[in-house]
Amino acid sequence: MPGGQDFGAGVSGATPVGIGHHQVPVFSVPVSVSPSEWRTIIDQLPFGLIVLGPGQELRHENAACRHLVGYGVGEKGGVEGWLGAACPDRNHREKVISSWREHIWRNQLTRTFTLKTAGEKLKELEFRSSLLQDGGITLTIEDVTETRRTEETLRHGKLKFRALFSHTETGTVLVDRTGRIIDANPAFLALAGITLKNLRLSSLTEFLRPSEAAELAAAEDTLSRLPSEGGSAKVVTRDLWLRTSNGEKRTRVTSCPVGEEAGGATMAIYLFNLLDTVPVNERLIARLRVVSAKAQALLHAVPDLILLIDPDGSVADFAPPPKPWRELTPDDSWRGQPTATVWPVFGNLLRQCQDQVTAGGKTIHADIRGPEDDSFEFSVTLSPCGEGQILAVIRNYSATRALRERDFWQGAAFSHCPLPIVMLDNHGIVSGANDAAAACLGLGGEQLCGRAFADFYEGGEESLREAIAYAGANPGRLASPRLLRAAGGENLPATADFLALEQDGKPQGSLVFFERRPGLAEPAGASCRGAFALPEAAPLPAANFPRHHENRQHSFRNQLQLVTSLFSLEPQGAAARDAFLRWQIRLRSMALACPYDQSGHIWVFPLLRSLADEVCSLVGRGPGRKEVIITGSEDITLEVQAATTFSLLIGELMRLVLAARQSGPGPELYLNLRPQPGGGFQLTLRPGIHRQLVFTDRDTEMEILELLTEQIQGRLEAVAQGKAVPEWLLIVPALNQ
């Protein structure tokens, strides 16, 4: 094999390596494939493949690699010589070789270089590398020149279209298929003597004489029925009277459809020129064809779903995304149908926001998220577009939702975990540490990152390497007998537990957990005291009582949080988990009901929001404001003596809805808070679509709800009102009633 060893010979397994969207076996082949056959397979790959040893020595390069630039790596004495030969400019060559060393060879990142081939042609080549177990790398090279040029052409086309529309001296109007004006350029606004705000409330026919408008529409309809020839735009030109703010003007109107399809054009562009300034129209027609073609390309390039909503909430028209979505499939049956019928969760959102958009003129941004069983996520933008209509732009973020949620929860759990944890890379260097570990070692998190963990480990670097190697060779979390040291050099009453991390069979560093070692007392002034023992509270003078009272409230909450965290150490049977969840919600409900001051009142709206966040966190439902929608008055308060019972009651009701996995679109629960005439307030609790209160033991749980309701002298009742899922109404009177 050229340039090195004959890999693949005598190996009985196959290890797949990801190359773009391909999975290609690199280092081993089945017993039935000979080395020569394997080399033939590698040479037939449609992309370049290079295998380098730990010292960048060439082990193999396939034929595609040599064809990319016209010569092979072996001919130039290695990858750096190969790259240098493809970079005639000295400055560019230095940048490319520096990026190769730092980004691709050392850190296995993906980079794209502009290289000149032996035939003096420029190519954009994308380099991807994968680390081998012996320290070498597998390098794949793909020609992405056409892809990059296509992206650049599309971006420039959009900018050119906007510049042409805005700065042309010809009056230009963009209308939808119903004739309503969507946009107009400054030249048309000056010609008609009207502002863009008033123009968007009008239709194009209002600016034309009725007979001439009908003649233009008939000509457009006749032309639309004819087949297109060579993809050319179907242009109609007429001399018409344009009604302006100061009289009528004789103009030449040229119209061209945009977004032509089987059901008719989605939009149309109209060009207006005064007859006394219109030259030969050939140049204008050619320009209109270019604009039409670019506008159609832009419509196909937009990755969003666009809906035009009528005032009654029905879908007037829509432009589907270029590629079908798995989560949502709009079709022609949507037109004319209520949004609540074709897409119920969007219809519910539209019902809540429609007045703000149409009457208030606001642009609303919102998210639509599904439960874990139906993990879709859409970003919705609602904007007014005149005559009570709403333009909705929907972007699909479902593909990245799982990744974002995993990163969010893992990051939050790592940062706030009371157990000190440190992340190490493959060389024993600290790559991350949570707050508890930073406090224990006596350094800030930023100061810890980049430090060798051997500085804090008894026995130094050699002992640390042995511990990491032993953890990597054995599954599970392994305890080390060696003590840890603080940044000041003093021994800590703790040892390290190592957990090796792997991905696709490759080591990815390790996690180190600090564990208190029984029988060792903490040294005086040890920086990890707070991580392993509760500090004793010193008495405060009477003058500091308000601050002392606040500190006691915070301390009480922290103690309740500590108690709830101990439940995770109990046996994890199904019944036990259900009981633990109940008591965690109850204890945290008690903690949230504690006041922050001596006012004697609790604000109900923030309490409901905090309860939603806690319950959603405990049941693994993500942020509370995504799953529980709370509306109503924000200035209602509750006496502190009833706050704990009220908080426990709401926590129980939320648990009955959120703890069970129930499939359905939209939020899990809706709460509406309103003041009660004569004092007190009422709270309406409505489960989301296809949700309901799920009882494990209905009699017992209903008895708990009734008992808590009686303690606040309230009333809890289910109000069916002919609905499949009843709403629950809680009335809380004023305490002195």
Image (cartoon, helix red, strand yellow):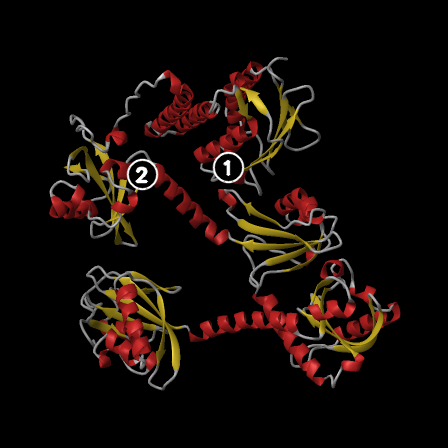
Residue at left offset 56%, top offset 47%: 367
The three-letter code of the residue at mark 2 reads Asp
Quadrant of res 411: top left
**Is residue 318 visible to us here?**
yes
- Looking at the image, the residue that sits furthest to the front is 543
Q: Which residue is mark 1?
A: 624
Quadrant of res 258: bottom right
Query: In which quadrant is the N terminus drawn?
Result: bottom left
Q: Which residue is mark 2?
A: 435
The correct choice, above or below, for 568 with respect to 126 in the image is: above
Q: Residue 613, how many percent across, how many down?
A: 48, 34
Q: Is residue 565 left or right of residue 28?
A: right
Query: In which quadrant is the C terminus drawn?
Result: top right
Element carrying mark 1: helix
Q: Is residue 178 left or right of residue 302?
A: right
Callout 1 crowding tier (Cα within 10 Å): few <14, some 14–19, many ≥20: many
* Label 2 vs 1, first from the N-terminus: 2
Element carrying mark 2: helix
Q: CA distance from mark 2 to mark 1?
A: 24 Å
The correct choice, above or below, for 170 with respect to 637 in the image is: below
Q: Residue 483, how many percent across, how many down?
A: 15, 36
Callout 2 crowding tier (Cα within 10 Å): few <14, some 14–19, many ≥20: many
Q: Residue 290, how many percent across, how many down?
A: 63, 77
The correct choice, above or below, for 520 with respect to 79 in the image is: above
Q: Which mark is residue 223?
A: none
Q: Residue 94, how many percent across, how many down?
A: 28, 74
The three-letter code of the residue at mark 1 reads Gly
